[in-house]
Amino acid sequence: MHYKNRVILILLFLIVTNIIWFTISKLPGPFIGLTFYGIIIFLYWKKGHYKAGIIGGFIGLGIHIYELLFKNLSGLSVFESSLFFINLILPIPLIYFSHKSYHKSINT
């Protein structure tokens, strides 16, 4: 599977995760994440802006690390916690594969 396809799959998974979380939660974060990753996938897929995945991954990772360290997450259910950790972990491969995809695009 090409790097570009992996990035698109990761972004789709993040979007679906945030849709699910938004439908079961009263928190604003999942809607923000849904909108954010929706914009990133548009820029990445339709506009060929490969750095959008890198930047989006760092922003998503940073936000969730901040929340992990400084926010009280004890009010989240087990299911919501799993959605949170998906949002925490998936930006890492998003950054990696976006970086690989970007370098492949400039070397061809």
Image (cartoon, rainbow, N blue to C red):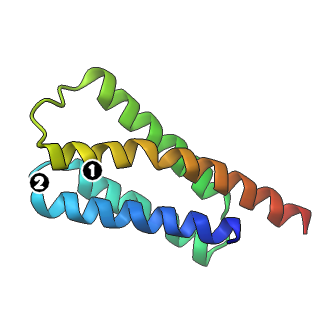
Q: Residue at x 25, y 58 (%)?
A: 31
**Residue 25: assigned label:** 2
Residue 65 drawn at (x, y percent): 39, 30
Residue 40 drawn at (x, y percent): 50, 62
**Residue 37: assigned label:** none
Helix, strand or loop at label 1? It is helix
Against 48, is 84 above or below?
A: above
Q: Residue at x 21, y 64 (%)?
A: 20
Helix, strand or loop at label 2? It is loop
Against 29, is 106 above or below?
A: below
Q: Quadrant of the N terminus?
A: bottom right
Residue 60 drawn at (x, y percent): 44, 44
The residue to which callout 1 is attached is 83
- Toward the top, the furthest residue is 70
Against 107, is 28 above or below?
A: above
Report the Cα–Cα distance between label 2 and label 1.
11 Å
Q: Quadrant of the C terminus?
A: bottom right
